[in-house]
Image: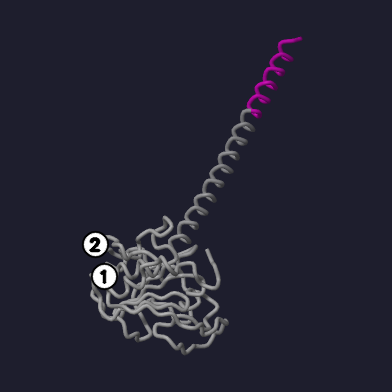
């Protein structure tokens, strides 16, 4: 092979090597772009999930608040159990009553209930969510009656209740039932003009306390233990 042919072959091999190197670099760049794009998509999804969770997804409604304060309350006493509800209510100066069911149809209109606070009756198709509600965000009565049908317990306090008392009710709300804090319970400011300082309701059941005192906590504990998950519809 002449020297001219050798030089021509050498240049051809160099050109092919350069083209291969360029192709490899371009391929690597495309891979990096794809990986970077995938990471960006995943990051966007993660942010979206966090925002949805923070806005009240799942069992927590958008009206609930997680920044509620708590305050020390007496430890559970011998009356803080389901079968001791009559004794617990009497010791606290409360009344514990059972009422006939007022119905359970779904309606979109307002409903006039026979008990105050309501304990059963026709209700809005959308149940109120479990949780602690700020005073301005109390669910409409038609929505929280639906929640009672699902076996929930609702703890209510009258407007103007001292903040310390509300914080104490937050503490009893957060006590664990079946190993879960706030298990199937709602805490909110009453919006029906009830005649009690504090009340707890379940489906067809009422615990009404005209005055707040330290014995009320055991009455609420006994009421919740006795009636949680006892509604006509079991909803986890």
Outermost residue on the right side: it is 1
Residue at image mark 2: 72
Task: Give the structural element (helix, strand or loop) at label 1.
Answer: loop
> Which numbered marker is on residue 215?
1
Real-space Cα separation, disc 2 to disc 1, in angstroms: 14 Å
Q: Between 207 and 47, which is closer to the camera in this rendering?
A: 207
- Is residue 19 magenta-colored? yes
Task: Give the structural element (helix, strand or loop) at label 2.
Answer: loop
Q: Between 190 and 40, which is closer to the camera in this rendering?
A: 190
> Which numbered marker is on residue 140?
none
Q: Nearer the viewer, mark 2 or mark 1?
A: 1
Q: Is 29 left, or right, of 117 in this rendering?
A: right
Classify 10 Å Cα crowding around label 2: few (below 14), some (14-19), many (20 and above). few
The region drawn magenta spans: 1-20
Quadrant of residue 115 within the rendered picture: bottom left
Quadrant of residue 31 within the rendered picture: top right
Answer yes or no: is residue 136 visible: no
Residue at image point 33% right, 70% down? 219
Q: Between 110 and 25, which is closer to the camera in this rendering?
A: 110
Q: Is 111 left, or right, of 172 in this rendering?
A: right
List x then y, in percent, for residue 61. Answer: 45, 68
């Amino acid at each position: 092979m002449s020297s001219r042919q050798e030089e021509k072959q050498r240049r051809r091999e160099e050109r092919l090597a350069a083209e291969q190197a360029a192709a490899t670099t371009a391929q690597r760049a495309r891979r990096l772009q794809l990986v970077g794009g995938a990471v960006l998509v995943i990051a966007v999804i993660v942010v979206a999930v966090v925002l949805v969770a923070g806005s009240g997804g799942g069992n927590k409604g958008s009206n609930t608040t997680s920044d509620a304060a708590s305050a020390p309350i007496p430890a559970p006493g011998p009356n803080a159990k389901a079968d001791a509800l009559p004794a617990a209510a009497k010791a606290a100066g409360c009344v514990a009553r059972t009422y006939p069911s007022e119905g359970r149809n779904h309606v979109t209109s307002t409903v006039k209930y026979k008990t105050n606070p309501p304990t059963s009756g026709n209700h809005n198709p959308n149940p109120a969510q479990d949780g602690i509600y700020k005073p301005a965000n109390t669910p409409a009565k038609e929505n929280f009656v639906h929640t009672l049908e699902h076996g929930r317990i609702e703890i209510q306090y009258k407007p103007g209740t001292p903040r310390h008392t509300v914080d104490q009710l937050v503490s009893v709300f957060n006590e664990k039932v079946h190993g879960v804090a706030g298990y199937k319970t709602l805490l909110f400011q009453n919006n029906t003009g009830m005649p009690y300082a504090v009340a707890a309701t379940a489906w067809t059941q009422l615990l009404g306390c005209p005055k707040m005192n330290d014995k009320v906590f055991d009455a609420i504990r006994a009421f919740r233990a006795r009636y949680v998950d006892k509604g006509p519809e079991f909803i986890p």
